[in-house]
Amino acid sequence: MNSGQAPPPPSTRQFKLEKESELRVEVGPDGPLRIRLLTGTAEIFGAELPPENWLTIPPRLKFAIFTWNGATIEVDGNSDVYVADETPMVSYVNVHAILHGRRARARAAPNDDLDSSQGPRVIIVGPIDSGKSSLCKMLLSWACKQGWKPTFVDLDIGQGSISIPGCIAATPVEMPIDIVEGIPLEMPIVYFYGHASPSVNAELYKVLVKELSRTLERQFTGNAESRAAGMVINTMGWVEGVGYELLLHSIDTFNANVVLVLGQEKLWSMLKAVLKNKPNVDVVKLHKSGGVVTRNVKVRQKSRSSAIREYFYGITNDQSPHSNIVNFSDISVYRIGGGPQAPRSALPIGAEPIADPTRLVSVNINRDLLHLVLAVSYAKEPDQIISSNVAGFIFITDIDIQRKKLTYLAPCGGDLPSKLLIVGTLTWLEN
């Protein structure tokens, strides 16, 4: 409290939750907000709230505090908060119980029987803002609480829960997911697609999904524990046209055997029909939570920008990124996709030249790279770029054409781990 001044108006409120109800919270842009558990037990995205300790939540976060048996929650700060007693949580935890049973059966199977020792591969699908990421977190947290270490796969390039937007990625999850810190990253495998929408280059998206899947299959073959724990796969919210085609491709590529459809009857019935010839694939319809908030394009863009900022500065601004200068001659920048495959004169009359979606194009370093986010590839040679995952990202802050020098921001100091960089259309304006 600030002594010598009139105390501020009380901003602390208490909420008593009955069993199987939840407190839905939307932290305002001016945040942060503090919450604590006074009595009973409660969880956020499947992770237990510690009793009595204040938890500080950053601005613009939306979440629900759920209790199975009743709880009293204290909230301090400005936010939209309300209690809801109708929630789909019981159906979500029932899904978890079934997955737990399958994991246990897979663990008990002989290791050399790759089919029986494979735990559930759950893919969560549904339109934009149907609560897919939240359900992923819950299923992962509940699995961790019971001693499993499932692999989280994030195919949602628009938002990105593991890495920055514009990437597809996977990471093992060993601990319930902290609401502030997010997914704990041990050794994430990240592939850089480079755009916020798959429509820019759908073929490249498919190629990278295949690459990620191959890498995970190799890991699973040698690790019985990971195989039994299985995967939880998050997808993007584009479920029509090309988006639907990419969804089917992902289900197929990862050999998903449980498809959870959130909040759309039509999608559920389409997938049910198309997967009916695969008897080992269960297509399950689930209700989306009433607490799911629909975000407009502007809000989604802001969220993308925040995710990129977090990569460089940390969630609570506790990291100091490094500004570095490099000579043009010390790096090579590539774009994937582009350039017609053949000149018009070499094509049949009336045929249009089509761009090769996976062609590697060398990019001249010029002012066009300003404010773009580039990936640093693990590739040793340019022709390995598509099949290689990335070490991290840099942000281009200045380009001196005269002196042939480029200034970039990196999350840590020292030389870049590789001189091969990938550029897409991912921009960020530091604010």
Image (spheres, rainbow, N blue to C red):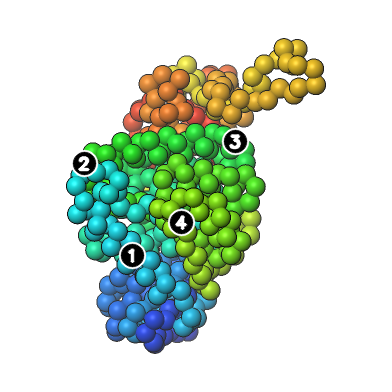
Q: Position of residue 75 (x, y in %)?
A: 41, 79
**In the image, residue 293 above or below residue 216:** below
Q: Position of residue 289 (x, y in %)?
A: 50, 71
Disc on res. 259: 4
| Residue identified by numbered label 1 | 98
Question: Residue 279 versus residue 375: which sits nearer the camera?
Answer: 279
Provide the secondary structure element on which disc 3 rests: loop
Disc on res. 201: 3
Q: CA distance from mark 1 to mark 2?
A: 24 Å
Could you classify mark 4 by the number of other residues whose Cα lies within 10 Å: few (under 14), some (14-19), or many (20 or more)? many
Q: CA distance from mark 3 to mark 2?
A: 39 Å
In the image, what residue type sits under mark 3?
Asn
In the image, what residue type sits under mark 4?
Val
Q: CA distance from mark 4 to mark 2?
A: 26 Å
Q: Quarter-wise, where is residue 68 in the image?
A: bottom left
Could you classify mark 3 by the number of other residues whose Cα lies within 10 Å: few (under 14), some (14-19), or many (20 or more)? some
Earlier residue among tags 1 and 4: 1
Earlier residue among tags 4 and 2: 2
| Residue identified by numbered label 2 | 112
Q: Residue at x 33, y 76 (%)?
A: 42
